Image: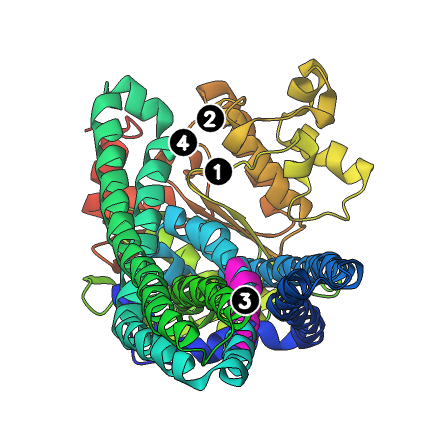
Amino acid sequence: MGTGGRDGLPAGRRPWRLLLDQVRPHRRMLLLGGALSLVGSAAGLSMPLLAKRVIDAFGTGAQLVGPVLGLSVAVLVGALISAGGRFLLERMGENIVLASRRTLVDRMLRLRVADVDRLKPGDLLSRVSSDTTLLRAVCTESLAGLVGAAFMFLGAVVMMALMDGLLLLVTLAVVAAVALMGTTIAPRIRKASLQAQVALGEMGSTLDRALQAFRTVKASGAEGREIAAVGEAAAVARDRGVTAAAWTSVAGIGAWMSIQLAFLAVLGVGGARVASGAMAISSLIAFLLYLFYLVSPIGQLIQSITQIQNGLAAITRIQEITELPTEPAAEPAAAGSHDPVGVAFDGVVFRYGDDRPVVHDDVSFEVSAGGMTALVGPSGAGKSTVFGLIERFYEPQAGTIAIGGRDVRDWPLGELRAALGYVEQDAPVLAGTFQENLVFGAPEATDEEIARALARTRLDDLVARLPEGLETPVGHRGILLSGGERQRVAIARALLRRPRLLLLDEATSQLDAVNEMRLREVVAEVARETTVLVIAHRLSTVTGADRIIVMEAGRVRASGTHHELVDADELYRELAATQFLVGS
């Protein structure tokens, strides 16, 4: 684990090593594709010599068929072999992108909830999509192109040395100046590329925020402000992209200028040598052809170095996610007991971060196995955090939490969560069909079990009215369902898991009075089979609870039945009075 980096993300290993780790599983295809590219390059290197033979044949009046045929075959064979090598490298690049995306998504979905809380969804999506796409260019055009260009460059230099050493020295002197410039520009390209990709992730996060609250944006008349915010983020991404493009252009112009200067120098020196009879005109032409052959490999080298810098920046961002700690492996739990379990908090202290206030301050309480227990209290009392700690979304800084008399840290994570049914406060529904949402937590549920869960949550009438029944799509985030329907779907989904402990966070907040009464009956029925722990602001849903725990400012202040608390606790009596459950 690194020491820490931007936004609290870990500082990873050297990007070059990370890049090689991505390529290593595909090294055979890389070697094969690279070898074919080298063979194609070798065919290209023969063309100036073959062209020299054609010129010499013109000068001597010899037969042209052989030289021209040889030149044509070299062109055709070189093109075909290079195309085959290119295809293999492109395929390898796609495989690397696929493997990288699978690894990244696997890692993201196994991250701790606390880490995901402080990351931005739009930035995470950017890392999976655009950052991984950059790896393809790096692993195809860049690494293989770098090898091919280096071979072409060295091959051309060797052939030029055999033809005229003096002209080669003139050429290398100019090229060396460009290489020196490139060593200073490459780090700047990488830095600018990293900043551009970070800005792109920020833009995605800004847009994601607006889309997640699309109806609120429209209802608030905030379209203009959100468009401006996304536009501002896009402008920052553009500016940083322009900076990266500027440095890339400087590198490209330098390469082009070096060839032009080398051409002028060789033309001057070589022309003088031809005039003095020290060099044949055909040799000068072949040398100049090799010089122009350097244009492609030098350009490829510059492009490859630029793309590699982009790729190193991308892989740095990818590695920031893959080096974050994950939850313990949660293997699917085997079928086991469905007997209800109790809960015990003993001296629990918890805060969401070292710089955040304490949410739980020495919280202690017990919930007996079976029956219904309610958590009530004002907003910010720490009620929902109880559920997050039970599910092990977070770890307390002090104290212990036991489920069924067993410390939650001793439970295998898969077994623990298989024993729990959890209905979140906003009752999320996923895009897909009605049935897919119902069986999301229990894919093995039978038709009879589904029908029973629908009947218990009063959803059977709704399903009967849907145009495609259980196969009806519910829209993005269940937008085609009402708030109350989404809550009932979430409860049915939890019931299908046959939990030993059912956690209901404000499960009736969006229900009308009739459906609330019906759901109270369902909860009471379920409580005869399992342990139900309910968080409620609407006290009418929990007045019949076996026990009510009152929380305030991160502490437990009282517990008892509804009637006991009305008599004994001032805060509970006040809450009940404001909801007309007792006289004021």
Q: Which mark is residue 320?
A: none
The answer to which of marks 2 and 1 sits earlier in the sequence is 1
Residue underneath mark 4: 509
Crowd tier of the residue under label 1, counting other residues whose Cα lies within 10 Å: few below 14, some 14–19, many 20 or above = many
Q: What percent of the width, then of the height, locates residue 343?
A: 48, 64
Q: Mark 3, mark 2: which one is toward the viewer?
A: 3
Q: Are marks 2 and 1 in contact (CB under 8 Å)?
A: yes
Instruction: Tell me which secondary structure the magenta stretch mostly adopts.
Output: helix
Q: Secondary structure at mark 2?
A: helix
The answer to which of marks 4 and 2 sits earlier in the sequence is 2
Q: Are marks 4 and 2 in contact (CB under 8 Å)?
A: no
Q: Are marks 1 and 3 in contact (CB under 8 Å)?
A: no
Q: CA distance from mark 4 to mark 2?
A: 9 Å
The answer to which of marks 4 and 3 sits earlier in the sequence is 3
Q: Mark 4, mark 3: which one is toward the viewer?
A: 3
- Residue 380 vertical position relative to residue 455 in the rendered view, above or below: below
The answer to which of marks 3 and 2 sits earlier in the sequence is 3
- Residue 466 vertical position relative to residue 540 in the rendered view, above or below: above
Q: CA distance from mark 4 to mark 3?
A: 61 Å
The answer to which of marks 1 and 3 sits earlier in the sequence is 3
Residue at 37 percent across and 83 percent down: it is 169
Residue underneath mark 2: 483
The answer to which of marks 1 and 4 sits earlier in the sequence is 1
Magenta region: which residues?
Answer: 137-151
Q: What percent of the width, then of the height, locates residue 275?
A: 40, 72
Q: What percent of the width, then of the height, locates residue 368?
A: 51, 61
Crowd tier of the residue under label 2, counting other residues whose Cα lies within 10 Å: few below 14, some 14–19, many 20 or above = some
Residue underneath mark 3: 145
533 left or right, relative to 57? left
